[in-house]
Each structure stands twice: as structure tokens, then as C-alpha cells.
Amino acid sequence: MKRIKICRSKCIGCLTCTAACMIAHEDNESRSRIVLDKNGKYNPIFCKECKSPECSFVCPTGAMHKEKDSELIYYDKEKCVSCYMCIMACPYGVLKAGETHHKQIMKCDMCKDTPEHSPRCVAKCPMGAITLEDEV
């Protein structure tokens, strides 16, 4: 199974990954973000695709769920009731409510609905800070 991996030391904070995400989803919001840590280093924030995802455990409708085949966590906006329990439960602070889509959770979907079916952030990162690797 492939997962997005981040090498923080390679990240220069260029935001190409967030732009690629917005373009891939034809949206003005990214499903990931880059923040500065307490030492002033860039810290890309991406879904960790947890083995035991708290976000899906607390979701009362099944909108946030782990697929059995891929073991990736997906979000179904049609089932979501905007309770934001998933946001509160995420131990990494990855999930966020959409700024323009207030009733939508911004969650990485590995660009599964794009023609490439592969994360655009990985393909577009000029520094190679974001990679797609087999989980060990």
C-alpha cells in the first residue's frame, strides 16, 4: 500500500503542493497545508492515513471511513452532517473545515478522482520533499 511521506528537511515552503492540490480538485482550497514550526522550519501537514483512524471511529454517519481494499481513509461529503467530530478527534490536527465550503471537511483523497489517479502534490513538489512510498 502506498502512502504520502514527507521529508521536512527538503521542504522550502514554496506551496507548490497546495497549488497542485487546488488545481487537481478544481477548488480554491487545499486538502493539505504548510505551517511554520516553533523553530521557523516548514512543516507540511498531510493526512497520515492512520491504521486506527480516530476520525472514522467518531464519525456518526460513516462519512469518514476506511476502505477495506486500499486501507485509505476517505470522506463522503454526501453522508456528512458537519458535526466536526472528525476534526476534533484527529490527533495530528490534519483535518479542517472548508473555508468556502463550510459544510465540507478538507481531507486528502490521494487524488483518486483525477485522471492520473495519483497525488498531484507528489508529482509537482520541486524539491522531492513529498513522495509516495510503500508502507513498511
Image: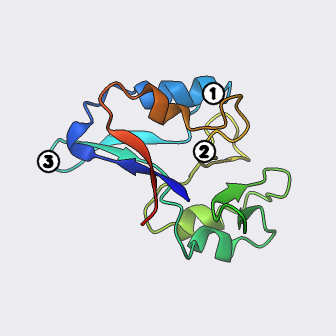
Q: Which residue is mark 3?
A: 39
Q: Is residue 49 above or below residue 27?
A: below
Q: Residues within 10 Å of mark 1 (few under 14, many from 20)?
A: some
**Label 3 or label 1, whichever comes before in sequence order:** 1
Q: Amino acid at mark 1?
A: Ala
User: Can residue 66 be seen in the rendering of this structure?
Assistant: yes
Q: Position of residue 22 (x, y in %)?
A: 58, 27
Residue furthest out toward the left:
39
* Front-most of residues 46 and 103: 46
Q: Which residue is mark 2?
A: 110
Q: Is residue 9 left or right of residue 64?
A: left
Q: In which quadrant will I find the N terminus?
A: bottom right
Q: Amino acid at mark 3?
A: Asn
For the image shown, how many numbered marks are present on the structure?
3
Q: Residues within 10 Å of mark 3 (few under 14, many from 20)?
A: few
* Front-most of residues 136 and 79: 136
Q: Residue at x 59, y 47 (%)?
A: 108
**Label 3 or label 2, whichever comes before in sequence order:** 3
Q: Amino acid at mark 2?
A: Met
Q: Nearer the viewer, mark 3 or mark 1?
A: 1
Q: Position of residue 65 (x, y in %)?
A: 72, 65
Q: Which residue is mark 1?
A: 24
Distance Cα–Cα, label 3 vs label 1: 31 Å
Q: Residue at x 69, y 42 (%)?
A: 112
Q: Position of residue 84 (x, y in %)?
A: 65, 61
Residue furthest out toward the right:
78
Residue 68, image quadrant: bottom right
Q: Is residue 64 above or below residue 19?
A: below
Could you tell me which secondary element the residue under label 2 belongs to? loop
